[in-house]
Image (cartoon, grey):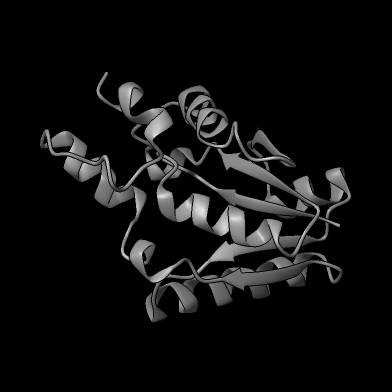
Amino acid sequence: MTCLYPGTFDPITNGHLDVIIRALKIFDKVVVAIAKSEHKSPYFSLEKRKELAILATKNLENVEIISFENLLVDLAKQLRINTVIRGLRAVSDFEYELQIGYANNALWKEFETVYLMPNLKNAFISSSIVRSIISHGGDVSNLVPHEILAFLKD
């Protein structure tokens, strides 16, 4: 069984990797779907985010990285994948994710959302925290996969 793991991944973090690794214990394959998300004004281009995700997951089997610009439900139907995974770090994440999960299910009754929690050491990591630290010249080496560090300094 295959699942989708959608997000902006701006950039991919150790928290994201943690969720991918946990998902691989449940699913045969994880398709990481990187959203264009122009309304979020991503720091990195879609192409760069995809490149970083490919680098970060290169040692994981059964992980595919794709990008998309349409509704997640439409992508899921197109790929014939009816299960999506989402990471939850805090109660505030749950409220937002629950709304999105209900909305997606209203659009496609077969659509299921599985929520996974990252390891406690990764629970505070978010892409926005990483971007903020990078923009101030800080060290993010313990927050992101080491494979992408050099690319973040550019």
Q: Residue furthest front?
A: 59
The percent coordinates of residue 45 (x first, y second) are 44, 26
Q: Which quadrant of the structure image shows residue 54?
A: top right
The percent coordinates of residue 69 (x first, y second) are 63, 37
Q: Residue furthest top?
A: 154
The residue that appears at 38% across and 71% down in the rendered structure is 120
The answer to whether residue 15 is left or right of residue 151 is: right
The answer to whether residue 90 is left or right of residue 50 is: left
The residue that appears at 37% across and 34% down in the rendered structure is 146
Q: How many callouts does the rendering have?
A: 0
Quadrant of the snapshot with the C terminus: top left
Quadrant of the snapshot with the N terminus: bottom right
The answer to whether residue 36 is left or right of residue 24 is: left
The residue that appears at 35% across and 22% down in the rendered structure is 151
The percent coordinates of residue 31 (x first, y second) are 71, 44
The percent coordinates of residue 65 (x first, y second) are 65, 35
Q: Nearer the viewer, residue 110 or 134?
A: 134
Q: Is residue 137 above or below residue 21?
A: above
Q: Is residue 106 above or below residue 2?
A: below
Q: Which quadrant of the structure image shows residue 39?
A: top left
The residue that appears at 41% across and 39% down in the rendered structure is 145
The answer to whether residue 122 is left or right of residue 54 is: left
Q: Is residue 147 above or below residue 138?
A: above
